[in-house]
Image (tube, rainbow, N blue to C red):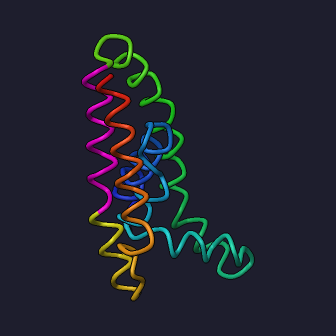
Amino acid sequence: MNFIIGFLKGLAMGAGAIAPGVSGGALAVIFGLYDKLANFIAHLSKNFKENLLYFLPVGLGGVAGILVFSRLIEYLFNFYEIEVRYAFVGLMLGTLPSVVKQANALKINILFYSLYPCSLQSYLLIWKIML
């Protein structure tokens, strides 16, 4: 992975970390970084330099994403609150297919275990937004 791609993935993950309803972890799964990151954290001394060089652009992008998007989201919430809330609901629902696809590749029946609570939570969230 080159520096620019890693930085952009980190930027999106940083933005996802501060965005309500969007998970940086879910974005890590979508970008294919979650398994490698979990393995790196679990075994810090194994291939440390290689892993550090791999995740350095991701980390820099994550910090930049948090700094840049926190200001942007604050501005948008101040002037476009309802639209931003609907956008976040869409982002939450939009990450589900990718996570389900990844779980199915690992032979995990994620639909049975998590789709019902997620849809119930989304329904309640949308109901709260509408009121």
Give the residues drawn in magenta, as a range: 82-96
Q: Relative to the observer, which residue lies in front, 48 or 110?
A: 110
- Label count reads 0
* x 49%, y 69%: residue: 34
Q: Can you give x and y, in whole percent of width and height, for residue 67 in the image? A: 50, 30
Q: Relative to the observer, which residue lies in front, 11 or 57?
A: 11
Q: Quadrant of residue 89?
A: top left
Q: Residue furthest bottom?
A: 107
Q: Is residue 95 left or right of residue 26?
A: left
Q: Is residue 48 left or right of residue 100?
A: right
Does the magenta portion include 85?
Answer: yes
Q: Quadrant of residue 90?
A: top left
Q: Can you give x and y, in whole percent of width and height, for residue 123 in the image? A: 33, 44
* x 33%, y 37%: residue: 88
Q: Quadrant of the N terminus?
A: bottom left
Q: Examine the residues drawn in magenta and state their main secondary structure.
A: helix
* x 54%, y 41%: residue: 63
Q: Relative to the observer, which residue lies in front, 110 or 33?
A: 110
Q: Quadrant of the C terminus?
A: top left
Q: Residue furthest right?
A: 45
Q: Can you give x and y, in whole percent of width and height, for residue 128 in the image? A: 38, 30
* x 42%, y 83%: residue: 108
> Compared to 62, does 34 lie above or below?
below
Does the magenta portion include 104?
Answer: no
